[in-house]
Image (tube, rainbow, N blue to C red):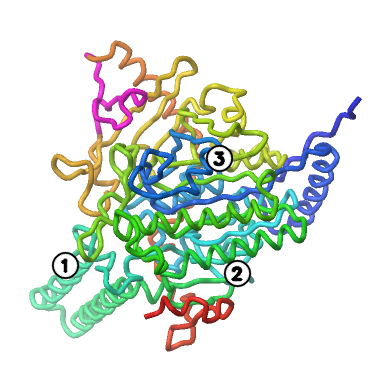
Amino acid sequence: MKAQCAHVPCIPQHGTMTRSRIHLMATAMITLTLTITNCQGDERPPNVLLFMADDLGYGDLGCYGNTTLRTPNIDRLASEGAKLTHSLTAASICTPSRAAFLTGRYPIRSGMASPHFVRVSFLTACNTGLPVSELTFAELAKQAGYTTALLGKWHLGWSTDRSDPDHKHPLNQGFDYFYGIPLTKMKDFDSREVKAWRRARPTIGWILTMTCVMTLVFTWSLIRLARLGRTGSAMAVVVMVTVILTCGLVYWVMENLELLNSFFYRNYELVEQPIILPQVTRKLVREGVEFLEQRHADSQPFLLFVSWLHVHTALDTAPQFRGQSLHGPYGDAVEELDWGVGQLLDTLDRLGLTDTTLVIFTSDNGAHVEESDFLGRRSGGYNGGLRGGKAHGAPDGGIRVPTILKWPGKVTPGHVTDEPISLMDVMPTIAHALHVQLPANHVVDGKDLLPLLSGEEKRSPHEFLFHYCQDEVHAVRYRPRDGSKVWKMALYEPAYLLQTDHCDFLCRCHDATPLDPPLLFDLTSDPGEQHPLSAADLPEYRALVNLMTKALRKHKDSIVPVPNMFSVYNMLWRPWNQPNCNFPEFQCSDSKFGQVFDEDVS
């Protein structure tokens, strides 16, 4: 008879953890490793390989119905694993969505849900970002003895001050190795494109200019009309000069986002400035292949998170992909993304790691449907008939994303599930796969997906899901415990242009119109949210609305207030923390790659 094993120890509650408890953590790690070794016998926990695209549309892949883009490698992954057709992000824009993905928690719980219209970090040298007190799936993997790495986009806060125990950096959040960008790609990184801050409507530049002019006019009028005397006039002049300098500084910062943000780092070392866009995917692939080969040579279990920069603008690819798709630079980027995924999957095959690796592919949010390039060509993706897109808040086009999960021996190849799941579920699913128990008093909103994907359970682990735009819930999704219906209650309507399902450039949450009564959609028969139901259409309308409203109140009651990471103070540029390479040239290249990609530099 097999001996009974002790219960896997719980990792200390991370939300209250301090650096002074390192010895306690070390003890837990050792005990956890021993427990896994003794309890699992011959069943070794899997390696983990995560792929996250940036702004990929629900309908951009062949396995999700696209017949005009070539994505054979991702399609093969879907045929060998499970395709999730109702996979949802926790936010319709990258920074809060990625925070939820890593932590398994709604962004509101970690202070990553902005209270104002700026919902993402847009400066490397500021203090926004994921608090170090948050527990990530990388930290879970390290607790289980895994080697962890992040390649590509981070966008969750940045500091290289290792003397600060709370500095925001992937290596301080559970990753052993990082090669990538602290922030995100921007259109500013391509000199041909219109700068991002000028594309916003009304433009930030126009608002800034008018604010400065009005302040100066008011101050000058005060001097002339109030007869303030020498002292008062001197103070007014100081105010005017301060306003001019402040406005000038803000304008300079917004005009120089490439200079301030276009970097590649290896761990804490700045190795490339500015980013050479055509080389990015190949460099990430080379780093990924090298990491996998090293782990194979060391017989070391690993968690590798490849956070692609594609298909966020600015768009550029290696020469062999340019002009090869039917959809211009955007299609070229999708096909290069697929190639990159294929290179790493082929490496798993070559090293004999395929059968022992859990692989997940997804996107951080839906396609940016309003996006276009300097020639007027569409440079955002296709959301497969879903309403809305990136940054729209609650419509599914911004939060419903292609997701594939492959786990040989656990998930049946070719399995398709239409049940609603959340990307927050990835964190507890990894915890289960690695035999790590989550802290008992640590709130995790995600659920383990294995019972659903293995066929043990037939329904989504979520009865309710809440869809935020900034720090407000804009919709509630309800999956009853019987039947097959999925209901959605929309509490706000985005400020769409007339007779369209899109905004001018980027939808703003505070422009959305509150709905009273709320709109109700049957997503099972109306995934495009085109036919709202009323009490006249549906006898159970009021009961469903009351049920979801009650669930929303319960959810809000569970939110513990925390400092908001998007406060104005946190978002201020800190020039003393500004990275730069070879001042005053602000230019360097990664010596690791030498002259390999020189054909891309023009």
Return the disc, 2 or 1, that comes first in the chain's sequence: 1
Residue position for label 3 = 405
> Which tag is nearer the camera, tag 2 or tag 3?
3
Can residue 280 be seen in the rendering of this structure?
A: yes
Tell me which amino acid carries mark 1.
Met
Residue at horizontal 46%, vertical 77%? 273
Camera-side residue: 409 or 523?
Answer: 409
What crowding class fits label 3: few (fewer than 14 Cα within 10 Å), some (14-19), or many (20 or more)? many
Distance between the alpha carbons at the discs numbered 2 and 3: 28 Å
Secondary structure, mark 1, is helix
What crowding class fits label 2: few (fewer than 14 Cα within 10 Å), some (14-19), or many (20 or more)? some
| Residue 506 magenta-highlighted | no
Magenta stretch in the rendered image: 515-536
Secondary structure, mark 2, is loop
Q: Quadrant of residue 197?
A: bottom left
Residue at horizontal 15%, vertical 78%? 228
- Mark linked to residue 210: 1
Return the disc, 2 or 3, that comes first in the chain's sequence: 2
Residue 114 in picture, x, y percent from top left: 39, 51
Q: Is residue 42 above or below residue 534?
A: below
Residue at horizontal 42%, vertical 88%? 585
User: Could you tell whether 538 is left or right of 6 in the image?
Assistant: left
Q: Is residue 56 above or below residue 43?
A: below
Residue 165 in picture, x, y percent from top left: 63, 64
| Residue 534 magenta-highlighted | yes
Distance between the alpha carbons at the discs numbered 2 and 1: 42 Å
Residue position for label 2 = 267
Tell me which amino acid carries mark 3.
Leu
Tell me which amino acid carries mark 2.
Asn
Residue 582 in picture, x, y percent from top left: 49, 86
Distance between the alpha carbons at the discs numbered 1 and 3: 50 Å
Mark 1 and 3 residues: CB-CB less than 8 Å, in contact? no
